[in-house]
Amino acid sequence: MSAAIICPRCGGGDCITPAEEVLESIASMYAACQSCAPDPQISKQLPFHQLDQPFRNVDDAAMRCQNCGKRHLDIVIAHVLKILVREGLRARDAALSNVGTPMITIGYPVPFPPRLGRDMLILVMDAIDKVTAEMLVDEVYEVKGVIERKGEPGQPVGILDADSAPHTYNLLAGCDLRGDVVSSAFGELCIYKTQSDTHIEFSRADSDKTRVLESLYYQRKVKGTVLDGCCGAGTLGLVAVLAGAREVILNDAFLPAVKNTILNIKANASILGLDPEPELHTDPSKLPLIADTGTPRLVATAHGAGASGPIDISVYHGDLADLAEVIDRCDLCMVDAFIGVSTDRFVQAWKERAGMVVTI
């Protein structure tokens, strides 16, 4: 049995399941067992004080399946709402829809209302304080972590570019490490992220950026050396390995993205055909939150052997334009910046060094 991957957020050994094990169990992960009660009939818009008494008085043991130990998502949210009303953070006329954004800890397009067990839910909430957040983690078996949303609705989490201040949410209680199943024509991965400092992307069967990568593959552009220049958690670059890229360079100016990328190399190593442990060249704890102007730092490398030959992965912390002074050549440079952010500087820096530059 391989050693547990330690969670970068809480230090535990149970937060990160290797991707191949996730994919083996995902179909039944949120399913009701034969002993589960039917789906409860709760309106998400009905005021709390008008809910039927069992839903207003729900506690941690109420309506939990005695066989599988899971509860329906709506029951869990009703339990959370009861605590919020009790603590004065929601009015009696608040509804389930006023609680916040529920995020299952392994996201994928669940075709039915999920049933949840221990630590299977992270809540992103407005109007929440640390004391009450800790109550939710302590009192609600299914809640793994509580995140306070900051900024304007729709404002992305992370950095727009290396010159911008980071926008992050606040992790108030528990752990916010979660994953999303990423599907492609080449296979599936599980991409983990520390969600309070990483842009939220809901797992979908048809992702826009994955579709772009698939199109490039069918044009025979995903080969040789592929650069994922604003890699975030590493999604595009690691899917490119599945697509047959022999060398992948992953780069981001935001340190949490670099850390998540290294974590995802570990979590998906078996599927990608990589050695289980990347080699660290720079201690991430000694790097700045946002990369300094100048030469990007090589943080980690990983190696392996896929069906088509050797695989080499490099992870850098730096500005993408500066990276052009370090990497002599790549066959494909992918630039996945936030919507509205100009990529002209990156395209200009790479137009002579890349066989093709694609903005996503």
Image: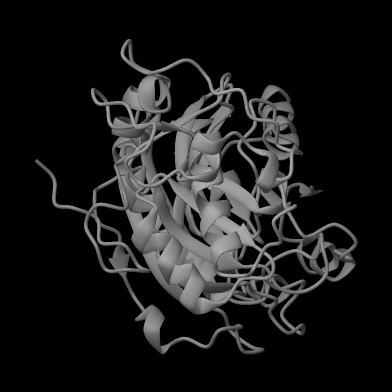
Q: Please state the total of marks drawn on the protein image.
A: 0
Which residue corresponds to the image point at 37% horizontal and 37% vertical from the top-left? 62
Q: Is residue 108 above or below residue 293?
A: above
Which residue corresponds to the image point at 61% horizontal and 65% vertical from the top-left? 328
Q: Nearer the viewer, residue 258 or 296?
A: 258
Q: Residue furthest top?
A: 34
Q: Nearer the viewer, residue 167 or 132?
A: 132
Q: Nearer the viewer, residue 161 or 246?
A: 161
Identify the colour scheme used. one colour
Q: Is residue 234 above or below residue 36?
A: below
Q: Nearer the viewer, residue 342 or 73?
A: 73
Asked if one can make out residue 172 in the rendered structure from this viewpoint, the answer is: yes
Q: Percent x, y for residue 339? A: 85, 57
Image quadrant assignment for residue 214: top right
Q: Is residue 204 left or right of residue 176?
A: right
Image quadrant assignment for residue 202: top right
Which residue corresponds to the image point at 79% horizontal and 60% vertical from the top-left? 338
